[in-house]
Structure formats: structure tokens, C-alpha cells
Image (cartoon, rainbow, N blue to C red):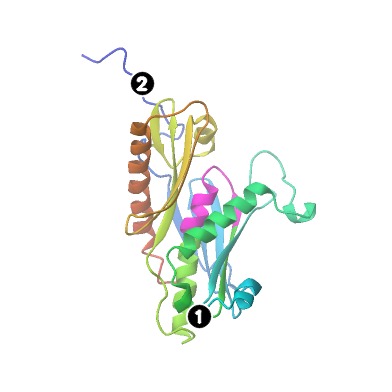
């Protein structure tokens, strides 16, 4: 007999199981002038990630005589990306918003975690992540797609004999998790994220080591058991994303 006091699991609006990713697809070569590009689709969240190689390093590296190269990212949401009406371009307002700066720094940190910058040589790889359509998880999709674009750009550098060996130390992906009505969920879409009691973004390498964990209790504090459940879900989702990405890593 069922326990009438047991909580009813949250029913996801799109019918997914609590531990299921949204449908994931990758399309390469979308930005033909970039060294490499990947359009990642995770459900209704679509992000174009394009990698560009610059044969120079930032001024601070030259000034401090830091050896090697640099990997960095820029992030933006197109004016039509959300369903809440047209958003103003941040460039038209003369400055980046705090959220944008925080996200692009996160993407840069995640990508640099799997690159030997000294072996990259004195060059910069820019990874631009432009959100075409947003339905939750844009920063995590940007990291997952951005890594693939970065990897393909590095393969191109090797094919062109501009570097002798790959500076990649591993692979990286990211996913969101959360607690909604007491149920731990993987890969939240916007309606779920809006209702979440806990919202968390997890960045992990293929060695199952954490690069970053961002977690916030939106309503009330949460116990260690909930944290463990969310981290387990995140690891499962990231392993799946890395597996899906393997099919496109060697293409432009």
C-alpha cells in the first residue's frame, strides 16, 4: 500500500522523466567565417558558439610576460531570444550587464580548465556564444557548445601546422539541475527554473572533476541529501552530453 503522506513527484510540463535531458542536437559549420562553429539546441534553448583564432595575446599577458596563450569567451542574448518581447542590445546601452559579464567569465573559466595555455602558444581563441532562443540553461548550453567549437578550432590549428600537438587536457560540459516541489530535476527549462526552490549549474570534465558549481536556494535552505541528489543528476547529464558531443568533435 502506498504511503498517503509521501510527496507526489513533480510532473514536468514536457513529460520528461526527472533525470532526462531535453532533446539535444548539434549543427556544425553554421558560421562559415569562424575557425569553427557549433549551434547547440537543448530543447527550445538554441545557442550559436563560434571560435575565432587571433595570433596575439591580451595586453596584460604581454605586459606581465606571461608565457603561452589565452582562451576567452563572450556571451550575448539576441534581442528576440526570449518570449518576453524585444530586449535592448547591451551595446546600445553602452555597457554590459552584470549577468552577461558573470556568464561570459564562467564560460571562459570552464574552457580554460581543459586547455594547457602554455602549449597553445602566443595566440588567443575567442569563443562567442550568442543565444538565439532562450528557454533556460543558456549558460550551460554555451559551455557545452563552446567547448566543441574550441576543440574543433584547435584541431584546425593542428591540421594547418600552426601548433604541433593538442593543448587540450580533457573535455568539459555543463548542465543545470534543481529542486522543484521537492523533486530533483535535470536540465531545467524556463518554467521549471522559474518555479525552482533550488537552482544549480554544474560544470564538469570528462574525468568527472568539478570546474564550478553554482547553487542557490530561492525559497529556503536545502539539506545535504538534496545537494547530493542534484550533483548525481548533473553528473549523469554531463556524461550524456559528452557522449553526444563525441560525434561532432572531429568536424568543422
The disc, 2 or 1, on the residue closer to the chain's N-terminal end is 2
> Which segment is the magenta one?
130-144
Residue 252 visible to an observer of this rendering? no
Mark identifier at residue 38: none
Image coords of residue 205 (percent x, y): 37, 58
Look at the picture and state if 156 lies above or below 161: above
Look at the picture and state if 155 lies above or below 91: below
Q: Assess disc 1: are there few (<14), some (14-19) or many (≥20) residues with their C-alpha within 10 Å of its C-alpha.
A: some
Q: Quadrant of residue 51?
A: bottom right
**Residue at the outermost front position:** 64
Q: Secondary structure at mark 2?
A: loop
Q: Secondary structure at mark 1?
A: loop
- Circle 2 sits on which residue? 8
**Residue at the outermost left position:** 1
Which quarter of the rendered picture does the N terminus lie within? top left
- Circle 1 sits on which residue? 121
Q: Assess disc 2: are there few (<14), some (14-19) or many (≥20) residues with their C-alpha within 10 Å of its C-alpha.
A: few
Instruction: Give the residue drawn at x 36%, y 63%.
Output: 246
Image coords of residue 97 (percent x, y): 69, 49
Foreground of the two, 77 or 67: 67
Image coords of residue 17 (percent x, y): 36, 36
Amino acid at each position: 500500500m502506498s504511503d498517503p503522506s509521501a510527496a507526489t513527484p513533480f510532473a514536468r510540463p514536457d513529460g520528461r522523466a526527472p533525470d532526462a535531458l531535453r532533446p539535444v542536437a548539434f549543427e556544425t559549420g553554421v558560421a562559415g567565417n569562424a575557425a569553427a562553429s557549433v549551434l547547440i539546441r537543448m530543447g527550445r534553448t538554441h545557442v550559436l558558439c563560434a571560435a575565432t583564432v587571433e595570433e596575439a595575446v591580451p595586453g596584460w599577458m604581454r605586459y606581465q610576460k606571461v608565457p603561452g596563450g589565452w582562451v576567452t569567451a563572450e556571451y550575448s542574448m539576441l534581442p528576440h531570444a526570449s518570449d518576453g518581447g524585444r530586449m535592448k542590445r547591451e551595446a546600445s546601452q553602452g555597457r554590459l550587464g552584470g549577468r552577461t559579464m558573470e556568464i561570459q567569465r564562467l564560460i571562459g573559466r570552464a574552457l580554460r580548465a581543459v586547455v594547457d595555455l602554455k602549449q597553445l602558444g602566443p595566440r588567443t581563441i575567442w569563443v562567442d556564444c550568442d543565444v538565439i532562443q532562450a528557454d533556460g540553461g543558456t549558460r550551460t548550453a554555451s559551455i557545452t557548445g563552446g567547448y566543441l567549437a574550441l576543440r574543433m578550432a584547435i584541431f584546425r590549428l593542428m591540421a594547418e601546422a600552426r601548433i604541433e600537438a593538442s593543448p587540450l587536457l580533457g573535455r568539459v560540459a555543463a548542465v543545470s539541475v534543481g529542486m522543484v516541489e521537492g523533486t530533483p530535476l535535470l536540465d531545467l527549462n524556463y518554467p521549471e527554473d522559474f518555479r525552482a526552490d533550488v537552482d544549480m549549474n554544474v560544470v564538469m570534465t570528462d574525468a568527472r572533476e568539478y570546474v564550478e558549481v553554482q547553487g542557490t536556494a530561492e525559497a529556503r535552505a536545502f539539506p545535504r541529501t538534496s545537494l547530493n541528489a542534484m550533483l548525481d543528476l548533473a553528473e549523469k547529464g554531463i556524461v550524456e552530453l559528452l557522449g553526444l558531443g563525441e560525434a561532432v568533435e572531429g568536424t568543422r
